Image (cartoon, rainbow, N blue to C red):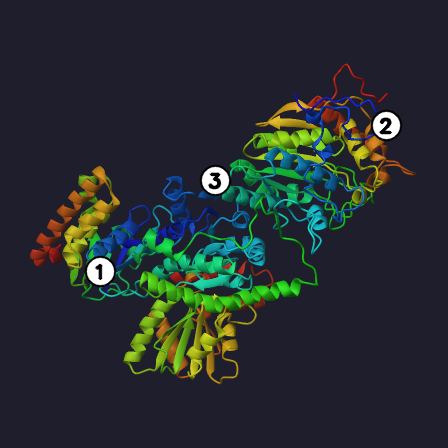
Amino acid sequence: MFQVRVHGRGGQGVVTTAELLSVAAFSEGRHAQAFPTFGSERTGAPVVGFCRIDDKPIRTHEPVACPDAVIIQDATLLHQVDVFDGLAADGYLLINTSRSLGDLGLDSFVGRFDRVMTVPASELAMKHLRRPLPGAVLLAACAALTGQIRLASVVAAIEGRFSGQVAAGNIAAADAAYEMVRSQMKEPARAEAD
Amino acid sequence: MLKQIEGSRGVAEAVALCRPEVICAYPISPQTHIVEALSTLVKSGELAPCEFVNVESEFAAMSVAIGASAAGARSYTATASQGLLYMAEPLYNASGLGLPIVMTVANRAIGAPINIWNDHSDSMSQRDSGWIQLYAETNQEALDLHIQAFRIAEELSLPVMVCMDGFVLTHAVERVDVPSAELVDAFLPPYEPRQVLDPDEPVSIGAMVGPDAFTEVRYLAHDKQMQALELIPAVATDFAAAFGRDSGGLVRPYRCEDAETVVVALGSVLGTIKDTVDELRDEGVKIGALGLTSFRPFPLDAVRTALGHARRVVVLERALAVGIGGIVSANVRMALSGIQLRGYTVIAGLGGRAITKTSLRGMLTEALADRLEPLTFLDLNRDLVDRELRRTRTTRRSGPAAENLLRDLGHARIG
Amino acid sequence: MGQQRIRFYQTGSFAVGNRLLDPDQRSVQSDTRRTNSLNSGHRACQGCGEALGARYVLDAVMRATGNQMVAVNATGCLEVFSTPYPESSWQMPWLHSLFGNAPAVATGVAAALKAKGRTDVRVVGQGGDGGTVDIGLACLSGMFERNDDVLYICYDNGGYMNTGVQRSGATPHGAATTTTPAVGPAPGNDFGKGKNLPLIAMAHRIPYVATATVADLRDLEYKAKRAMEFRGARYLHVLVPCPLGWRTASNETIRVARLATETGIFPVFEAEDGDVVDVTKIRKRRPVADYLETQGRYAHLFGDHPREDVIARIQAEADRNVRVFGLVDSAVSDGRG
């Protein structure tokens, strides 16, 4: 089983990100489950989305305590919420930011994780979608980083949920993110030095 | 057809496939997505002929369903928590009149204090209302149970509530198989009422019954539920034959055959329990789980058969009978009367607290060593509770308890 | 124009006999083929205004719908005395659910019939003032605002009579009930409280609202028939004296109801889409005392320590009704001098 936790703020599409991840996995014939932390949603309040992917039926519905990957859609949460809780040293950490980890004051935090990737998802979203909704970008980045889902599945999930310009924009942003992460992964030294 | 959809959506599609003629519901978290989806299906014309009535309260919702069902229409509503309480009077009325209404209860805690998250206190509070109560373990089962529910209800002329964990199941996006219209139509024929308001054959329904016949009327209600003990598994068998999967029935044992310890529970927590059971089995522990799908009627014989040979039974329940302890465990104990074994009641997951595998393992370790108290509250914050108890002992004007606890929690987090 | 204008040349008689009229002008009640929707043998008190009103109205509705009607009844006197186990006096399909939900249940019946394409079958919801203006008000308002195709009839005797004459939101000011007893400095039901359901119904802008009493059979039958000409939510508010609760003689029911209209205490009118379209004028205005002194529930206003002040307040309310509804033509004397 592969478990993902997505952290963000209300209004940023955290729930959609987790859902589309599950839809992408579903389209590949796998079992997948997605759900948010529930509550009175408020724009701007911290929100968590969960996603589990497996090849056999997923029986449990408890929140993801030990994620294999953590996606952080809003870097301002890093000092407010323990976003790393339960993530093993070899877990994947994907952070939406255009700044360096040092600038974010995260060097000490992330030093213990081996597989950290930053992606300027909001900027890519603004460029291709003209909205700061980084979900699709992060999904593609997650696909590239973890190899759990194919880019084509992410694209299909986007097309299933959105249409017209919104779908096209999301797909363009996703494509760009995928390439960006793939190329960054070919140069691991550069990723860690940032 | 396999779909990756929200549990609520699956239920809405299943209900729509059953061709309800009247849907009347009042919104309450976490049932809202179900009725929103159904209202869209009706408004767009996809679900027709069907009247969707936007009622002004849950009391009205059940009342509209009563009128519709008495006029011979297949009727459906959904609610949770406070809404179920608000319709308590018509709830009893519906079962007393023998109207085959089907209702989804998206299980949610009852206040005060107000809490929108999952537990079973709502449906448990109405366990004696005369309604059949079925509890879904998964979103697939939730979907399937609605189809079975209409058939069971209409055959017996008794209403059925399908319970599914609010948010946990309703708001989880998962893979479900939504059956085809042809399959459902073949399984669920049009509603043939036993009694109906028909100008061509007028009847009076709802007269007062005095001491001379009331007992007999109530006996017949109980008898219907005894018939349900036979019908529920029969319908589940038919369902399996028609749709190709196991859903429903009275109980579902998991690795119980040679189990010395069995964990009994209802609803989605059974998934986590099964994962825990598998882990412990790998470590050589003879442990199993028993899921109760039908809570009313309570399957005394089936429970006795599944548990009778065990040495230890742990009943994990998401509700609390304040003043005595467990609700499900009291019913289980009745099934085991005369049999000597160790029984433990564990109150867990109240108000949406997550029941984790870690906590379950810890609790079961204690149970296996028979170190558990007869009544335990899983993951109780003893410190928080003691602080409030101290406060109430020392100050008369100690203030609202819930707010005190929240403030203490806040301090703990900041400090 | 509203009701038929029939002049009876037999004075001093309350006969509803129609031998002088053409058959098509005769009342439903005079027809031997009337359905007797509420059949004899029920257990109502002698002189019960509600039993009279229910029979009049429902027979008229059955006539208007070709006997294609379903009735939903709230808990109350009508439900209790009409279905004494194991008998029923109802001749048409009838459903009793609870005290406060008759309008919602009626909505459900109407929805079912509509889904089944049986719009030829019409739905009536009915109850006393307690079940309508108090405990049933939320459901009634819901039915109104959705414009559900139901005629709701309120039989108003100003109190919870079946449970022993307790005060309701429709109990008139100054009247004694068991929970507004005639004791203390302000005996009887308080002024400044209470609801006017016909006005509330009109505020919902439903197609048809009308008031009527059991004193005028033809008017009542006409309004029931008129109501059935509309689709959507309709409301009929019928004043029905209760000999037990009002402490009137059981053979005075119709006369007392007539006094209620002649004093201006109970305005009789019709409204469509929220506007009054017709009013029954008072031919000869009577002072409210003429009405009040017929009833034991107002006895504390008379006798050794009369309460002229309370009577004056009730008179002022009646005067206001006359003014607001235009119940008296200026050419006619108000008969109070």
Q: Quadrant of the C terminus of chain B?
A: bottom left
Residue C170 visible in image: no
Which residue appears at 72% of the width and 26% of the height? Answer: C321
Q: Where does label 1 land, which residue? A: A30
Q: Tell which residue pokes out farthest to the right in this image.
A: C304
Subunit that carries the residue with mark 2: C
Dot 1 amino acid type: Arg
Q: Residues within 10 Å of mark 3 (few under 14, many from 20)?
A: few
Location of residue A21 by image quarter? bottom left
- Mark 3: secondary structure: loop
Q: Tell me, yes or no, whether the two marked residues, 2 and 1, touch with CB atoms within 8 Å.
A: no
Which residue appears at 40% of the width and 57% of the height? Answer: B147
User: Taking C136 as reference, is C165 left or right?
Assistant: right
Dot placed on the residue nearer the N-terminal end, 2 or 3 = 2
Q: Tell which residue pokes out farthest to the left in this image.
A: A186
Q: Where does label 2 land, which residue? A: C12
Which residue appears at 30% of the width and 79% of the height? Answer: B281
Dot 3 amino acid type: Gly
List x then y, in percent, for residue C155. Answer: 69, 39
List x then y, in percent, for residue B35. Answer: 42, 48
List x then y, in percent, for residue C79. Answer: 68, 48
Mark 3 and mark 1: span between their CA atoms? 46 Å
Please tell me which residue lies in front, A87 or B79.
Answer: B79
Q: Tell which residue pokes out farthest to the top in this image.
A: C331
Residue B312 visible in image: yes
Q: Where does label 3 land, which residue? A: C117
Mark 2 and mark 3: span between their CA atoms? 50 Å
Q: Tell me, yes or no, whether the two marked residues, 2 and 3, touch with CB atoms within 8 Å.
A: no
Please tell me which residue lies in front, C6 or B254.
Answer: C6
Q: Nearer the viewer, mark 2 or mark 3?
A: 3
Subunit that carries the residue with mark 1: A
The answer to whether residue C294 is above or below residue A16 is above
